[in-house]
Amino acid sequence: MFDYAWLLFAFPALGALIILFLGPWLSQKIVGWIASLAVLSAFGVALALFASLYALPEEARSITITYWEWMTIANFSVPAAVLIDPLSIMMAIVVTGVGGLIHIYSIGYMDHEPRYQRFFFYLNFFILAMLILVMSNNFLGTFVGWEGVGLASYLLIGFWFAKRDDQYGWYADAGKKAFLVNRIGDAAYLLAMFIIWSSVGSLTYAVVEETAALLPTTTLVFITLLLLFAVSGKSAQFPLYVWLPEAMAGPTPVSALIHAATMVTAGVYLIVRTGHLWDLTPIVAQTVGWIGILTAFFAATLAIVQVDLKKILAYSTISQLGYMVAAAAVGAPGSAIFILVAHAFFKALLFLGAGSVMHATDGVIDVRRLGGLRHKMPQTYITFLIGAMALGGIPLLSGFWAKDAVLAGIAADGAFLIYSVGVVTALLTAIYSFRAVFLTFNGKPRDMHVYEHAHENKLIMVGPLWILAFFSITIGWFNTPFALAMEEFLSASTGHQEHVGLFLELVVVTISTIVSLFGLLYAWARYIRGEHWTLTLASWFAWLQPALDNKWYVDRVYDAVIVRPLAAVAGWFARVFDPKVIDGAVNAVGDVTVDAGEAVRKLQNGAIPTYAFSIFLGVVVVLIYFIFAG
């Protein structure tokens, strides 16, 4: 089966090409199904590769297939090769499986979109780029996919480029913001590759892993710090997270694809794939752990005050990515991938559920205008509730086991301060998860016009919600403390993660359960019952409200320190330097040429006496030259 791994890329590539060249002559539904079947076919290939890999003994679960020598310049050589191991296959299954469901959902969601073919071409291209990212056996191949998803995200986030509103401004600007912020991380990735090549002589992951221990500590620190910037950009960690909330300007399936199954998980994948580098630089790894967990806390505090349903989920994604980054950096890479997989299902479910609400209410997702929708949209309500329960860490759902694995792994590594921040973040997560449910679906309608026009969506949109809900419940069962099947399978790629002792596991599970249930109780008491004690508790933190409403002033700091100074410099160049220096120099050359031409033109007047005088003058000049030269 491994010889057919190329089909993993061929199917989405073929789907994209068919849509590109034949799309204008095909009906919208046919285009949607071509794109969906292309990704689902790739999903079938990923499952077959998984089965073949699982049948091998653990020590043989790493297979490299080289197709051709991609780039050879002097002694620089990079192959076009794929690395088939538990980590890459797990990522491929998530990307194609969740991505396929999002494609099917999009057939119904985008059915009135005039640029329907373009949208599905972008989706297929996105999946192709993400597969290149996770399957390549070297840094440069991963970088090609890394840039590919960056380009695809720019195109999809700004898909409604002609649209503008008070919240996002021009939607095209949101795509630009994502693209530009990610360029910072991409530049750091390039520098890291240059250092790796100059130090090791290869960009292949296996070679770098074998020789990393021989590198000077300073070199390793530089490499990992640069990779940290790359991860911060792609996986929206502080301080480069600011593009992700703006990505909500894109169609909701795009939000689900970016947040759940593809782009933002690329940074987490990179940390786990290069885990040997972080093991050799514990100080940097600890720094990354702190950045991850503080990002998780920071984003959770913002999610708890958002009124846009998609923005709640956007900040939630940043927070969950913080958990993944922290776990991957401080010695629990298996747990990081586990929460990545679980998060892919329940976050895709939540985003598609939000899209279902948006589709049914003519674009209204301000939770202050919703309420009571469970009566109009019972299937969306049930599935969204399941997703919120998984995100909030309610026992026995996937999010509970995933969060428990992360927190237990962090605690087992001795990072108890990071663990403590993670517990507080888990409480906030449970509160904002159920706040989103209760304000949207429960209680009385707060806008009767919206409520009266709301309706349940058709099967092509609701069906994927039920599939995602099923896996949001069950996927965690494969990695409970009693059946660590997922982490055991991944160990061939991530190394054997130290198992948490039974006592510590029980303590972590107990605390997680108490925290999650208290968050549920608080949200129910405040947003359904309006009980006084919840208002009193909230009043203790009222002094933080201005900071939270202004997103901790981070965007204002960026605006004051970076955006406005750059705009001022650019304005000065546009007003002064460009017209007076650049244009002035060019125009001066032109003026001199014109004046010289004008002077010469006067000599060419057609009068014989003028020409005779010119000849005489020339002869005199030549004679004088020879007289004095001699």
Image (spheres, rainbow, N blue to C red):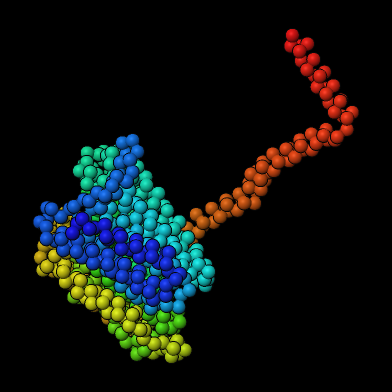
Q: Is residue 279 above or below residue 420?
A: above
Viewer-proximal residue, 487 or 224? 487
Pick the residue in front: 425 or 35.
Answer: 35
Q: Residue furthest right?
A: 609
Residue 48 picture location, percent across and down: 19, 64
What count of labels does the image hold? 0
Q: Which quadrant is the C terminus positioned in?
A: top right
Q: Is residue 338 visible?
A: no
Point 50% across, 59% down: residue: 559
Placement of 323 over or under 609, stated as above or below: below
User: Viewed as shown, does residue 592 lie left or right of 252?
Assistant: right
Residue found at x 26% / y 57%: 6
Asked whether residue 468 appears in the rendered view, the answer is yes
Q: State the image quarter where residue 499 is shown.
A: bottom left
Q: Nearer the viewer, residue 306 or 618?
A: 618
Where's residue 162, x and y in %?
Answer: 53, 69
Quarter of the picture holding the N terminus: bottom left
Q: Please state the horizontal and vertical placement of residue 400, each as a whole percent of the image.
A: 21, 72
Residue sitting nearer the eye, 461 or 274: 461
Q: Quadrant of residue 247?
A: bottom left
Q: Residue 296: horizontal and vertical position, in percent?
A: 32, 64
| Residue found 41% across the figure and 52% down from its top | 184
Locate residue 164 relative to residue 368 in the image: left or right. Answer: right
| Residue 198 drawn above or below residue 529 | above
Quarter of the view holding residue 152? bottom left
